[in-house]
Image: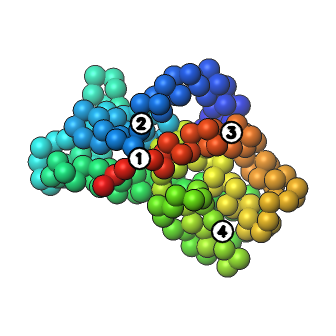
Amino acid sequence: GLAAREVNAFLDRHQGWLLTRLAKFSTDSGLRDGGKILLRGVSHRIEHTGSLRGLTEVVTVDGSPVVRVSGMPEHVGRRIAAFLKKEARADLERLAAMHAATIRAPIRSISMKDTRSRWGSCSSEGNLSFSWRIVMAPPSVIDYLAAHEVAHLKEMNHGPRFWALCKKLCPGMEEAKSWLKRHGSQLHAIDFD
């Protein structure tokens, strides 16, 4: 994989481009054929297949990333949301397991939610919960969220020991926190219904 510093350097170099892309997303996010959606920080064109059945999948068309969606046109937003939730689960289960192994902390369960008030939570029983919308953010931000919630398995607070552990798990923590603070509300604003 890429080193955190390489990812952060890339994000720094392309910050203007990312901000421009994010600015194009409003509450009317254009979740229809020809519209755009972010997946792991990359803008993907939405292509409705016209067929009623089929998987939602990512393909490359003429060198550009495309999310191909089937089903009724009025259900494109919901189909994309279901696809993003599945992608988020795969990413977050993998990242949380990796971070939990690093600090030798067991995870009881992982769930995906569509919360507007928080990006994730960790219960004292070891249940982790994440907003699936985080999968629209760059990979370094997704990793930070996983590290943040896993750190709560050892430190159920936001004290100095928690932040030190979080930084150990995710050295690019500050940049990711900053990104989330600046752009998180835009991800929450996208209406998938």
First in sequence: mark 2 vs mark 1: 2
- The Cα atoms of the two marked residues, 4 and 3, are separated by 21 Å
Residue 122 numbered mark, or none: 4
At mark 1, the secondary structure is loop
Q: Position of residue 127 (x, y in %)?
A: 61, 73
Query: The residue under label 4 is which amino acid type?
Result: Cys
Q: In the rendered structure, are the residues bearing label 4 and label 3 in contact, judged by CB atoms less than 8 Å apart?
A: no
Disc 1 target residue: 190
Quadrant for the C terminus, please: bottom left
Between label 4 and label 3, give the one nearer the viewer: 3
First in sequence: mark 4 vs mark 3: 4
Does the rendering let one see residue 93?
no
- The Cα atoms of the two marked residues, 2 and 4, are separated by 29 Å
Query: The residue under label 2 is which amino acid type?
Result: Phe
Q: In the rendered structure, are the residues bearing label 2 and label 1 in contact, judged by CB atoms less than 8 Å apart?
A: yes
Quadrant for the N terminus, please: top right
Query: The residue under label 3 is which amino acid type?
Result: Ser
Which residue is pictured at 34% across the width and 26% down the height? Answer: 64
Among all residues in the image, which is located at the extreme right? 160
Which residue is pictured at 68% across the width and 43% down the height? Answer: 177
First in sequence: mark 3 vs mark 1: 3
Q: Is residue 168 left or right of residue 134?
A: right
Query: The residue under label 1 is which amino acid type?
Result: Ile
At mark 2, the secondary structure is loop
Residue 25 numbered mark, or none: 2
Q: Position of residue 43 (x, y in %)?
A: 41, 32
Q: Position of residue 31 (x, y in %)?
A: 30, 42
- The Cα atoms of the two marked residues, 3 and 1, are separated by 20 Å
Q: Is residue 10 left or right of residue 47?
A: right
Disc 3 target residue: 178
Between label 2 and label 4, give the one nearer the viewer: 2
Which residue is pictured at 37% across the width and 50% down the height? Answer: 191
